[in-house]
Amino acid sequence: MQSKTQIIGITTTVPSEILYAANFIPVDLNNIFIANENPDKFVEKAEIIGFPGNSCAWIKGIFSAVKSENIKTVIAPVWGDCSNTHALCEVLKTYGINIIEFAYPYDYSLQKLKLEMNFLFDKFNINEKSVFEWKKKLDIIRKKLKTLDKMTVDGKISGKDNHLWLVNSSDFYGNPEKFDNELDEFLKTNDNINKYDDFKRIGVMGVPSIWSNFYDILEENKAHVVYNEVQFEFSMIKSIETDFYNQYINYTYPYGMDFRLKEIIKQMKERDIQGLIHYTQCFCFRQIEDILVKNNINIPVLTLEGDKPGEVDARTKMRIENFMDII
Ligand code: SF4
C-alpha cells in the first residue's frame, strides 16, 4: 500500500474518494494550466516538443502542467473523458510518467463501473470501507457547494464564482480541509440580496471555457449564468444522498450526449433558463455533439468556439451581444 502521501495528476474528474483513501494528493492538471499567469506558454511549450498546432489547447496545457509541476504519476480515464487522452498518455509515458489507466463504462453499466473501481481498490491496496468514509467526508463539503449552487440560481452568487468553486471541486485543491474553510468564508461573505434581477438567466454547457474573461463579458451583457453544466457534474452535488457507485453512474460527463442532454433539459427547466450557450473547444471531438444539442434543445442556443487561452475575441463578443438581444 502507498503509505507516503504522493501527488497524483488528474486529467479530469476521477473518483477523488479513492485517491484520498489511497493517501494521494490529487491535482487537477487543467486547473494548474489555466490558473497559471501565462497559460499560453504551456501551450507553446507543448508545441515546441511536437504537439500539433491543430490539436486541443487543453491537452497541450495538461502535458506542460505535468512537466511544470514535476508530477510523476497521472491517473487518466482512457474512456469517458477525451479521445486525445490516449495519445497524451503515450507521450507522457515516454517522459517516464507513471500512467494509471481507468475507464468509465461506455454503456454506463453499474456492474462494469464496479469492476473498474475494484481494479483501482486493488491497485492502491485500499478497501471499499475507507472509500465510503471519504465519500461521507467529501459530501459534507458538497452540501455546502449545493448551497452555493442554489444561491447562484437565486441570484446571490455570480456565474463566475459558481464556475470557479464547482470546477475546483474536481480535486478540492488537493486539500479538502482548506477548500472547506475557504468555502465557509466565501459563503459567509456572499449571502447578498439578489444582484441579478434585471439579468437574463443563462445556462452554459460544454467543457469549461478557456477564455479568461468569458463570465465578465456575459455579465456585461446582462447574462446571469445560473447553470454551469460540466462544472455542476464535476461537483457531484446531485449525488450527495446516493451511494458511492451510483454517484459515478449519475455523473453524466463521461457518458454519451443523449445521457447528458436528459440532465441538461431537467436542469434547464428547474432553473428557468432563457438561453443556452454551448461552449466548444477548437479541435475537440465533442464539437460534433453540437448537432445533438441543436436538435434537442428547444430554447435559443448559441454555440461558441474557443481556441487558445486569453480574452474573448471581438467577433465572439458581438455574437454574445446579438444573442442576448434576441432572448
Ligand atoms: S476540450 Fe475536448 S479535446 Fe480538449 S481535452 Fe477536453 S475533451 Fe479533450
Image: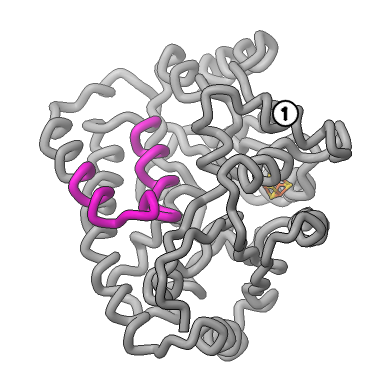
Q: Position of residue 63 (x, y in %)?
A: 70, 45
The residue sitting at 67% across, 32% down in the picture is: 42
**Quick check: can you spot residue 261?**
no
Using the rendered view, name the quadrant where residue 86 is placed: bottom right
Q: From the viewer's side, name the closer residue of 84 and 200.
A: 84
Is 327 left or right of 285, judged from the image as shown? left
- Identify the residue at the far front of this view: 4
Coloring scheme of the render? one colour
On the image, numbered disc 1 is attached to which residue? 307
Asked if residue 3 lies in the magenta stretch, the reply is: no
Q: Residues within 10 Å of mark 1 (few under 14, many from 20)?
A: some
Give residue 279's position: percent from left, percent from top.
Answer: 62, 36
Q: Secondary structure at mark 1?
A: loop
Percent position (x, y) of residue 233?
Answer: 46, 56
Q: Quadrant of residue 160?
A: top left
Q: Residue flagged by tag 1: what amino acid is it?
A: Asp
Q: Please tell me which residue is depicted at 72% across the width and 36% down the height of the picture.
A: 57
Q: Nearer the viewer, residue 100 or 201?
A: 100
Which residue occupies 63% across, 11% down? 318
Which stretch did the figure color magenta?
A: 160-183
Residue 164 falls left or right of residue 309: left
Residue 65 vertical placement versus 239 (above, below)? above
Dot 1 beta carbon under 8 Å from ligand 1:
no
Compared to residue 125, the image places residue 232 above or below, namely above
Residue 234 visible from this viewpoint: yes
Relative side of 287 to 246, left or right: right
How far across and how far down the image is residue 178, in percent?
Answer: 25, 49
Q: Residue at coordinates 65% horizontally, 51% vertically from top-left?
A: 296
- Look at the image and say whether residue 165 sits in the magenta stretch: yes
Most frequent secondary structure within the magenta stretch: helix
